[in-house]
């Protein structure tokens, strides 16, 4: 395995920064998903003949798909950047 000792120790400040960035990244992903899904839902509801029920079903499906693609993978990522698979 590659030696990464030239990057230095992970001090408490670095770990705290990584946790803050990780939380911010997840917050941004949730915000993107919520805003995009709301725009999609309102567009289907008011600008197409899908109506309320059709737009709600489509919005729920896209929200679940968006969660799986955008949020779920990032929430499960380890904070240690040097872990395999990151």
Image: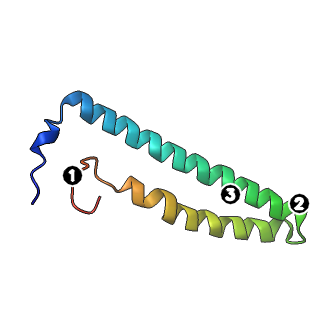
Which residue is labeled 1 in the image? Answer: 82
Do the residues under discs 2 and 3 have CB atoms within 8 angstroms? no
Question: Considering only order in the chain, which callout, 3 or 1, is on the residue closer to the N terminus?
Answer: 3
Q: CA distance from mark 1 to mark 2?
A: 48 Å
- On residue 46, which mark appears? 2
The disc, 2 or 3, on the residue closer to the chain's N-terminal end is 3
> CA separation, marks 2 and 3?
14 Å
Image quarter hosting the N terminus: bottom left
Mark 1: secondary structure = loop
Q: Which numbered tag is attached to residue 37?
A: 3
- Residue at image location 48% in from the left, 56% down from the top: 71
Left/right of residue 2 with respect to residue 79 in the rendered view: left
Q: Position of residue 22 (x, y in %)?
A: 39, 43
Mark 2: secondary structure: helix
Horizontal arrangement in the rendering, residue 24 relative to residue 2 (left or right)? right
Q: Who comes first in sequence, dot 1 or dot 2?
A: 2
Q: Do labels 1 and 3 touch, CB within 8 Å?
A: no
Secondary element at tag 3: helix
Residue drawn at the location 25% of the way across and 35% of the way down: 15
User: Quick check: 86 above or below 32?
Assistant: below
Q: Report the side of 56 relative to 19 (left or right).
A: right
């Amino acid at each position: 395995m590659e030696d990464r000792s030239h990057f230095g120790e992970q001090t408490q400040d670095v770990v705290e920064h990584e946790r803050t960035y990780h939380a911010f990244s997840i917050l941004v992903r949730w915000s993107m998903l919520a805003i995009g899904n709301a725009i999609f839902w309102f567009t289907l509801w008011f600008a197409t003949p899908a109506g309320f029920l059709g737009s709600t079903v489509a919005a729920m499906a896209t929200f679940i798909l968006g969660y799986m693609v955008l949020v779920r993978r990032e929430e499960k990522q380890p904070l240690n950047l040097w872990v395999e698979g990151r």
